Structure formats: C-alpha cells, structure tokens
C-alpha cells in the first residue's frame, strides 16, 4: 500500500508538471489562435478566478492524505508532492502576489506539522511493532487485552497460536539469516491471510498469535487451515536455495470477550503441542 501510494504521488506530480509546462508553452504564442492556446488561456483565466478555492481544496486533500498513517510507514511523500503542486500553482498566478505570500507560510507550517506527525507515528511504530516480523509485538497484544489500545474485539473471539515446525533445524541447517527471513515472510503471510478480522502479534520466538474477531468454532478453524496451507505452499528463497516450512496451529475460542481471552490463549497453546505430537503441519482445535 505504501509503495502504491508513493508511486501514485509521483505520477500525480509528473502529470502536474507536464501540464504546467504545456500551459506555459501554449500561452507563449507558439500556437497563436489554435485550440491549444485557446484552451490554455481559458484554463489560466478560470484558474485565476477560483485560485483560493482550488488551493484550499488541494491543501485540505493533501493534509488528509498526509496524516493518514499506513501501518508500517507514514505517507510522508504526499507532503512533498503537495508542496510542489501548490508552488506550481503559485507560479502560474504570480501576478497575484498576495495569495503567494499567504500560501508560502502555510506550506512551511504544514511541513513542520507533518514532520512532527511523522515522528510521532515512528515512535508508535517502534513501541508496538516487532522489528523483524513487522507485525505487532506481545506488548501491544497485552495492551489490547488491558483495554489500553483502541481495538474493539467484541464477545466472540478466537485465538490461533501458530508455531513454525522444526524452526531450530532451519537455523542449524541454513543459518540464522535464513531463519530470520523465513520468520519475517511467514509472519507477513499469516497477517495477509488473517485480514480483515485478524490481529497478528509475535508471541515469542517463532510463535505467532492471531486474534480473530467475530469468528469462533468452524469459522476460526477454516481460517487456521487457510493460513496453514498458504505457508505450506510458499517457497522461501535464500542464497539460491529453496526452503519450505510448515505450521502447527492451535485454535481456541471464547464467547466472553476479553475476560475469557487468557483461557483461550492457554488452550490454544496446549493445542499447538497436541498438533506437534500428532505429526505437525496440522490444525488442532
């Protein structure tokens, strides 16, 4: 999502730049009386008439998108793009000096506020995310149960405890760098499959916990099977070597909301060991 947003921002900036150059070139007299010049002239006249309205609208839209924080990255690029766009519009209406004087301080304030918001977003990220797996850490999971985090779980909750089978063997055979890669990518697969109901946290070591909202019994088991199959079919590439891993998943649920979550976690953890005893690569509920 962050890459898509960044690319769209640069495309938007490139299109604006090209359009700006087109308008300047056509009103310079190279196409005297032709359609491009008439279009450019009407555009500039119309733009001048609604200068403040257009800039205010673009300013608000830029602010909204810039303060929208995507999970791992703050959409900081939209601030820079917004500044560039507003500067282009200022140049196009340079005959009206007073709007330029008004907008330039606003740009400076906007960038400073955006930088501060980005800094706060980074602090939030470091406090609640595991740096290796790029999912929530156990501290954040506990804050959800304690009611500190602004997450509504409801009454029907399922816990999926996912454990990578023979992970120590992977580290011993291919090295810890390979183990880190597999742990990271496995966490991303689990997170992607768990959405939108799932909250994914690193419980510890190679154990990853999924908290499913509004899904119990067979629905939770179906989601767990979907996660298991997605990881099993994934081929992890490390230094020209193909590595495959499987998951043992323990599932438990509760209809008591947060009050019953600790019992569900304990039961899910017990079911993981049952899955391993029964041959691994399976879901036990």
Image: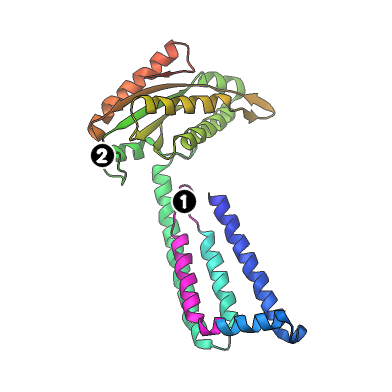
* First along the sequence among labels 1 and 2: 1
Q: Quadrant of residue 240?
A: top right
Badge 1 element:
loop
Q: Which residue is the site of mark 2? A: 146
Q: Position of residue 147 (x, y in %)?
A: 26, 42
Of 166 and 234, the residue lying toward us? 234
User: What is the span of residues highlighted in magenta in the rendered image?
Assistant: 47-75
Residue at x 43% of width, y 60% of height: 67
- Give the number of the mark in front: 1 or 2: 1
Q: Position of residue 277 (x, y in %)?
A: 43, 11
Residue at x 44% of width, y 35% of height: 194
Q: Residues within 10 Å of mark 1 (few under 14, many from 20)?
A: few
Residue 205 seen from this side: no
Q: Which residue is the site of mark 1? A: 70
Q: Position of residue 280 (x, y in %)?
A: 47, 15
Q: Residue furthest top?
A: 278
User: For this view, does 160 lie left or right of residue 26?
Assistant: left
Please identify the dominant SS of the magenta region. helix
Quarter holding the C terminus is: top left
């Amino acid at each position: 999502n962050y890459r898509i947003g960044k690319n769209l921002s640069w495309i938007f900036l490139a299109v604006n730049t090209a359009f700006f150059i087109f308008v300047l070139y056509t009103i310079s007299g190279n196409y005297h009386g032709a359609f491009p010049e008439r279009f450019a002239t009407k555009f500039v006249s119309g733009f001048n008439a609604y200068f403040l309205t257009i800039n205010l609208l673009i300013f608000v839209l830029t602010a909204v998108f810039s303060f929208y924080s995507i999970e791992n990255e703050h959409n900081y690029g939209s601030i820079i793009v917004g500044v560039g766009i507003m500067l282009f519009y200022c140049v196009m209406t340079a005959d009206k000096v007073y709007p330029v004087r008004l907008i330039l301080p606003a740009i400076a304030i906007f960038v400073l506020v955006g930088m501060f918001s980005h800094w706060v977003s980074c602090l939030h990220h470091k406090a609640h995310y595991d740096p290796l797996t790029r999912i929530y850490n156990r501290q954040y999971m506990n804050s959800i149960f304690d009611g500190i985090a602004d997450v509504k779980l409801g009454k029907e909750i399922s816990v999926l405890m996912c454990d990578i089978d023979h992970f120590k063997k992977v580290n011993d055979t291919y090295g810890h760098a390979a183990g880190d890669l597999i742990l990271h990518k496995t966490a991303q697969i689990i997170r992607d499959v768990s959405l939108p109901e799932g909250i994914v946290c690193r419980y510890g070591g190679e154990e990853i916990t999924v908290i499913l909202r509004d899904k119990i019994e067979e629905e939770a088991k179906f989601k767990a099977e979907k996660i298991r199959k997605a990881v099993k079919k994934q081929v992890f590439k490390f230094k020209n070597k193909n590595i495959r891993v499987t998951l043992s998943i323990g599932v438990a649920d509760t209809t008591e909301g947060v009050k019953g979550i600790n019992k569900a976690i304990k039961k899910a953890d017990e079911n993981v060991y049952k899955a391993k005893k029964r041959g691994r690569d399976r879901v036990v509920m």
